[in-house]
Amino acid sequence: MDMPDDYGYVFKLADNLELYISYHSEVEGANKDTLRHIFDFRVGDVDQTFEEIISRYPNLNIIAKPFDAPCSRVATFADPEGNCWQISQRANSVDCEI
């Protein structure tokens, strides 16, 4: 993956399906940070999808409301088991190609 200020691997599985694996190079062994894994889903519109999700699940644990990250717009939630689920919308920029 070639994105500014980010690192990891992106596997393009289909036109609208990608698997993104990011490093957590500073995390080793037992750690107080419970948010070690994030599962990311690409969507067409993060803001619209975010509003739809919270309208259906108003008590959802929101980790991050929609914000602009390098090369994408992102929102993150935690499920009842403490796993992080992220929705993202890739920016249209030649600097953000996989």
Image (tube, rainbow, N blue to C red):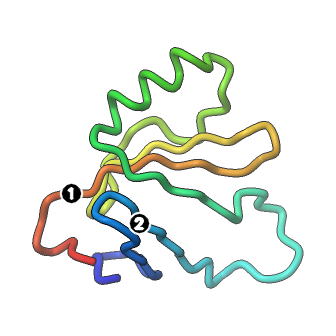
Q: Residue at x 21, y 71 (%)?
A: 96
User: Does residue 22 sit above or below 16 in this rendering?
Assistant: below
Residue 2 falls in image quadrant: bottom left
Task: Reply above or below: 94 against 66.
Answer: below
Q: Is disc 1 placed on a helix, strand or loop?
A: loop
Q: Is residue 39 above or below residue 60?
A: below
Residue 88 is situated, as x and y percent measured from the top left of the image, at: 38, 50
Q: Is 19 on the left or on the right of 1, as rendered?
A: right
Q: Which residue is drawn at 78% across and 83% down?
A: 28
Q: Residue 70: x and y, percent?
A: 30, 63
Q: Where is residue 53 in the image (x, y as percent from the top left)?
A: 51, 26
> Could you classify mark 2 by the number of other residues whose Cα lies within 10 Å: few (under 14), some (14-19), or many (20 or more)?
some
- Amino acid carrying label 2: it is Glu
Dot 1 surroundings within 10 Å: few (below 14), some, or many (20 or more)?
Answer: some
Which quarter of the rendering shows the C terminus?
bottom left
Q: Is residue 35 left or right of residue 9?
A: right
Please name the amino acid that badge 1 sits on: Ala
Q: Mark 1 points at which residue?
A: 91
Distance from the alpha carbon under mark 1 to that under mark 2: 15 Å
Q: Quadrant of residue 17?
A: bottom left
